[in-house]
Image (tube, rainbow, N blue to C red):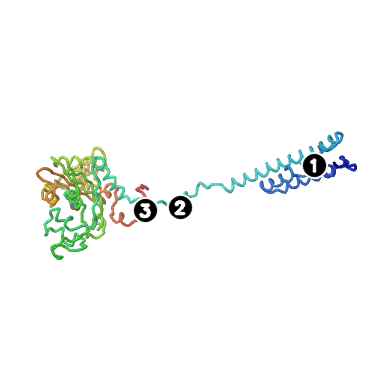
Amino acid sequence: MSAPNKSYDPVEVEALKPEAIERMRDEALAAFAAADSLDALQEAKVAHTGGTSPLALANREIGALPPQAKAAAGKLVGQARGAVSKALAGRQTELEAERDTRVLVEEAVDVTLPYDRARAGARHPLTTFMERVADVFVSMGYEVAEGPEVEAEWFNFDALNFTPDHPARQMQDTFFVEGPKGTAGDESGVVLRTHTSPVQARSMLDREPPVYIVCPGRVYRTDELDATHTPVFHQIELLAIDEGLTMADLKGTMDHMVQSLFGSDMKTRLRPNYFPFTEPSAEMDMLCYVCKGTSVGNPDRPCRTCSSEGWIELGGCGMVNPRVLVACGVDPEKYSGFAFGFGIERMLMFRHNVEDMRDMVEGDVRFTRPFGMEI
Ligand code: PHE
């Protein structure tokens, strides 16, 4: 055991001299004042108030003082520590306020800036309209069917009872990929389909009756692009094969379609026509959805949409020709069916007052944008 240290005078502890305590306090205050960020202040806080800071160490020394010296030293150190923590809190508040102001400025959002400079794309109105029409039939239980756009001449014409010399086979209407039939031997040529009707033949060959299909798709004809023609356009084809179907079913189905698309007071009418693959065949008109027929014989209220005729031509239709049923393996004694086909571009022109068909194919977003950003 070592002997007591005779020269030890607790009152004279170096760290507890008033000048030393004042210096510690002043250094702490200076460090806080110099801290220019919350991080720097945190460092100064650890250095000047932490467990190993000079003032904390001095505080610890008090315990070793004789009782009569403790009070004075305690007061001295306590006042210094109080001043230090007050200065710390004050600087902390100042720096936090500075930070908050800076954040408000730096992170301010300019709500007048466009939210997204790169506009999102959307599907073309032709596509969305075609799907909407197909949906009307899907809701009646029809199935969506598809076929190739590069089609065998047999499906496009022969199966549909087009005789070999039918004018529609001539070069002016049909894009031939191979053929045409007759010049390329007895084989069926290959064409870009001129209508969606070959899907009728494909669907009958693929399925057992009853058959209820709707076929939206792209078709091709050798037309010049102008205000009312385009060599690539779209059709929707409808085919129903079942026992006991009549022209009345066809008309009822089409009435339902125009009512779904244009309003419950719409109706259709039939005019005689000819197609090789339907018998009897008809042209289907729908009531003009703008004037509802009121412009007819009423020169004071002319209608631009239907040229005051009261009706708009929709497309071709009829009862499926029994020769087509036979060519596609369906028993015409047992089954009958109806078919309908119409152009989407024309319909979109009427529905949205589009005056020039070229607008639909040129891809200018100023045309498509007003239709909305349906995706
Ligand atoms: N495919 C015919 C055309 O493009 C339209 C049509 C379809 C006619 C179905 C009758 C039945 O002109």
Residue assigned mark 2: 117
Quarter where residue 212 is shown: top left
Closest to the observer: 11 or 211? Answer: 11
Image location (x, y in percent) of residue 252: 18, 39
**Disc 2 from disc 3: Cα separation:** 16 Å
Closest to the observer: 296 or 256? Answer: 256
Closest to the observer: 58 or 89? Answer: 58
Q: Is mark 1 on a helix, strand or loop?
A: helix
How dense is the environment of label 2, judged by Cα within 10 Å: few (below 14), some, or many (20 and up)?
A: few
Residue contact between numbered discs 1 and 2, judged by CB atoms under 8 Å: no
Extreme residue toward the front, this view:
1
- Mark closer to the observer (3, 1): 1
Q: Is residue 310 visible?
A: no
Image location (x, y in percent) of residue 301: 24, 43
Residue assigned mark 3: 366
Q: Mark 2 belongs to which amino acid?
A: Arg
- Mark closer to the observer (1, 2): 1
2 or 3: tag closer to the N-terminus: 2
Extreme residue toward the right, this view:
6
